[in-house]
Amino acid sequence: MNKRVLPRYPAFALALAVVAPLTAALAQPGSPSFPAKPIKIIVPFAPSGPNDIIARVVGQKLSEAWGHAVVIENRGGAGGTIGVELAAKSPADGYTLVMGGSSSLAVAPGLYTKLAYDAREMTAISNVAFVPYAVAVNPHVPAKTIRELIAASKAHKGGLSFGSSGSGSMSHLAAELLRAEGGANLVHVPYKGTAPAVTDTMAGQIDMMIADYASLAPFEKIGKLRLLAVAGSRRAAIAPKLPTVAESGVKGYAVDAWFGIIAPAGLAKDTVAKLNAAIVSGLKAADVRQRFGELGYETIGDTPEQFAATIRNDIEKFGRVIRAAGIRAD
């Protein structure tokens, strides 16, 4: 029956022959029409944190560039792994992205024995922002440099105590790396968040901590904390006079806290290129640089290949630190 219908309607058959492949092409992830509808950026943490703030800035620029809404969806939990897993299992069509950070992408693989995703296999789009961390001590600690801090930790019976925003957090791993590579004698005191750890450092309940510069700097100005160095691989634009830990004598030390956009594995190369170009262009905007600067963030905007390399390298580095310190997820 069906074989007799199409020959009777040659125009219909011709239309099907033309339209069907075109429809299929438009549906493919690498379609020239991308983007043709709203894009979703999953934030794997609660609102108002760095992931959320940076994602909303990126989303606004993508919306301005393409004329489509960008929806921010907060899916927190399990150190950011729930949101990243949700993105990893989404269709690889460019319409679902995730604002991952060094904690959820590079640290989580070492903390969690079973993850439903491998960040190294997902599609890196662009590293977006760098958040400088700094080493802070209570003024009673007899140290004004990293060398002096390490010496003081060795001289103090039982070592110096350091606070973190939680076991396995970036602030925890940054101090563990200082212990491993600098030989510092340090004792970990985990907190539920950065703020209470900063409060107890100022009060002298603990001796020191490593945290994002913006959380520490206001208290240095009033003499409650002393900042010794920045933890990153380069000096921070917001604090150019502070040396890096590496410059201060711990060669090779670097803890870069970053936030970037990734997508499910298998995203078409032309869609990756479009997303990367739009994000990098948006990061060059004066209002973005001003907003990030006010928060103490620095824009990055690198290539997919560079970002993928950063993820791989940091997974390896933090994995070594986690194994050496015997850290497990809470």
Image (tube, grey):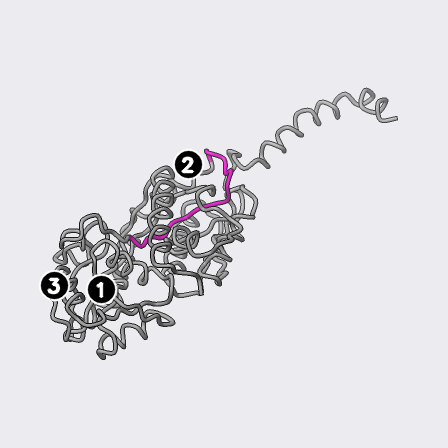
Left or right for 288, reference 42: left
| Circle 1 residue | 185
Q: Which residue is drawn at the image coordinates 81% and 20% (left, top)?
A: 7
The quadrant in which the C terminus is found is bottom left
Report whether residue 234 is seen: yes
Q: Earlier in the sequence, mark 2 or mark 3?
A: 3
Disc marking residue 273:
2
Left or right side of 54 for 153: left
What's the mark number on residue 148?
A: 3
Q: What residue type is labelled 3?
A: Glu
Q: Look at label 2 and name its amino acid.
A: Ala
**Relative horizontal placement of residue 5, taking residue 150 as reference (left or right):** right
Marks 2/3 in contact by CB < 8 Å: the verdict is no
Q: Is residue 312 above or below residue 151?
A: above
Q: What stretch is highlighted in magenta?
A: 256-270
Q: How crowded is mark 3: few (under 14 residues within 10 Å), some or many (20 or more)?
A: some
Q: Which amino acid does label 1 sit on?
A: Asn
Q: Where is residue 157 in the image (x, y as percent from the top left)?
A: 19, 72
* Other-residue count near label 1 (Cα within 10 Å), few / some / many at <14 / 14–19 / ≥20: many
Residue 246 in the image: state x and y as whole percent: 18, 51
Query: Is residue 262 rendered magenta in the image?
Result: yes
Whether pointer 2 and pointer 1 mark residues with C-beta atoms closer than 8 Å, the reply is no
Earlier residue among tags 3 and 1: 3
